[in-house]
Each structure stands twice: as C-alpha cells, then as structure tokens.
Image: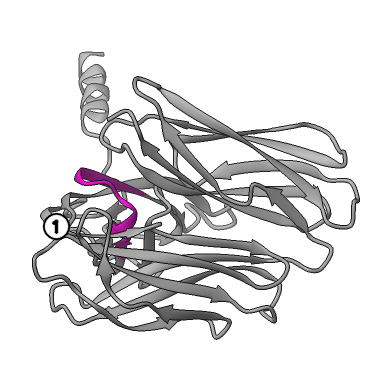
Amino acid sequence: MNALLTLLALGVANPPAAPLHCPIPLGARGEVKAGAPLSHTFDLTHIGSVGTLCITRVEAGCGCLRQTLSANRLQPGETAKLTIEVNTLTQPDGPNRWQVQVSYTLDLPPVAPGAAPVSQSGSQLLNVTANLSREVSVVPPQLAFSCTAEAAGSFTITDRRTRPLTVVKAASTSPHLLAEIGKPAAGADGTRQQVVHVKLVADAPTGHRDETLTLYTDDAAYPELRLPVRVLKRGANGVTATPDAVALRFAQEQDEVSALVQLRATDSKAIQVVNAESDDPSVKVKWSPGSGSVAAVRITVARTAGKPTGSSIVRVRLLEPVGQDVMIPISWTDGGK
C-alpha cells in the first residue's frame, strides 16, 4: 500500500511533459521605440515520441497582433516557427505585455489493433514584453471605413524630435485605397506634423477586408510606418450608423464614459443586431434586442491604468439585413489629466 501511494504521489508531482514545447515562452524585448512593428519569433517543437501534433489555433489577446506560422502539423522532433508582430502605433507608452495562446491536438495511433485512435488536446501560452517610448505618434492609429460609396479619412503623424521625419511615399495593399501626402507643418504645440489623406474609392468591391497603408519616410530609425485600415463596403441597400465614429473624453475622476450609436437600414427595412464586440477589452458593448426600424448600440469605455488614450473598432453583426456588418471606430482621451 505504501509503495502504491508513493508511486501515485510521484505521478501527481511529476506529470508527463506536454508534447508541444517552447524553450523560451517569454520574449522580453526591453526598451523599444514605438512606431515600427515589433516582431518576435517563437520555436514550437513536438517533443513527444509518437503521434501527429496539429496546431489548431493561435489566439491573440489583442487586435494589434499579427501572427505567421511556418507549419501547423508536426511529427516527433519537428519544429514550427511562430512569428508575432505587434503594431506598436496602437499601444500605450510604458510597460506592455502581449499574450498569445497556442492550442493543439495530439493524434496518437491506436493502442491495439482495431481500437479507435486517441486524441489529446492542450495549449501553450506565449508572451512578448516591451517598454515602449514614443517619439513619433500617429493619430488615429487605425482607420475604419463602413460605407456604401466613397469614403475618406486621414492620419496625422507627429514627430517631437529636433530633427523630425518626413513621409515621402505611401503604398496600400488595395488599389481601391488611395493616399495623398500633405506637406509638413508645425502643429498647435510647435511640434512637426504631417497629414496623410486616405480615400476609399466609390467602385471598391463590397465585403470586409483588412488592408494596410505603409508610409515610407526619410528617417533610418523609422523607415516605414504600417497603418491598419479596415474596410466594410456595403451594397446600396446597406446600414448607416449615427454617429459613424465615436470620440469619447474622460472627465476628471470619471471611471467610464459611454455613447449611443443608432443603426438604420438605408431602404427603411427592419434591422436586428445579433452580436457586437470590440477588439479592446476596455470597451464594452450592449445593444437593443429584437427587430425594428432602428437598433441602438451602447458603447462604454472603462478607464484603464497606464492607457489614458486609445482607439478601437466595434464590429456589429446583424441578423437583419442578412449578411450585413457595421464597423464603428472608437477613440478616447483623458481630459481629467
């Protein structure tokens, strides 16, 4: 009996190693200047002796992350490389931590002839940390177009250094997204600013796409700035949001601030929201139930320590009209400081 208890205790104290192993699950990048994308690569190795390991999902805790995986099926001893890229333009100054969860299944051969194969599942958490400092800022850090025809917006680049950069060229991932570079000028506080005007042309195809506008500069420290642009082009019988963008401002000692957005179908048909969510955890969204001529969406932003300003995209999914989504850009500032 004592020997059995000892063996059980050893089994609890020393559980079998997980088949997916990352030798360095924390990418500590130290001091980083915000602006250029921050990239870090993790090695993911199948350390089991048998079975096929399938990476089923790579889930980021922040919409600012992009990931590239070299392989999603591994045999024993094989390694996949997972590269995480952080858009630092959308992140606050100071210490930051970005988390990624890698989910997987391990398909094992049958233990006996005629027996069913065995499948196990698990996950591996990965983190990237950095202390961001900002010399160059872009406002807003991302654009979102939700429209039925032509739409326009702009980015303002501010450089606080004594020798500021100049944007000399712009390139888009879409031929329907055009950019016009303005001349540099002094801002209200005397810092150097440059505006880049962005236009979505009227004949852009319908549907949802995530595009990127890359700004090339004459500065070796910031050779390019990659700015996300989300496009939701609807057909003529689409849905309008009033307002189509929300700018919130915290008053002194105010813990949260909110705004109401009304949605209407342009053809006056019924509208019903089935879900609405933000890509930022500090933004909460509620919506009116049922179907009617108008749907209301309440957007609330909670004050977050270390992040007095920010921006987000709220995506509203509609049951009616069928197949329609609405994206609402959100930004907030702390007016109490």
Q: Quadrant of the C terminus?
A: top left
Q: Is residue 158 above or below residue 252?
A: below
Please identify the dominant SS of the magenta region.
Answer: strand
- Tell me where residue 5 appears, x and y as whole percent: 25, 17
Q: Is residue 138 above or below residue 195?
A: above
Q: Is 98 contained in the magenta span?
A: yes
Q: Quadrant of the N terminus?
A: top left
* Quarter of image, res 192: bottom left
Residue depicted at 37% across the width and 77% down the height: 182
Q: Amino acid at mark 1?
A: Val
**Residue marked by disc 1:** 32
Residue 49 makes an appearance in the image: no
**Region of the chain picked out in magenta, as a range:** 83-100
Q: Is 45 contained in the magenta span?
A: no
> Who is closer to the viewer here, 286 or 77?
286
- Tell me where residue 57 appears, x and y as whole percent: 46, 56
How many residues crowd mark 1 within 10 Å: few (<14), some (14–19), many (20+)?
A: some
Q: Is residue 232 left or right of residue 160?
A: right
Element on which disc 1 rests: strand
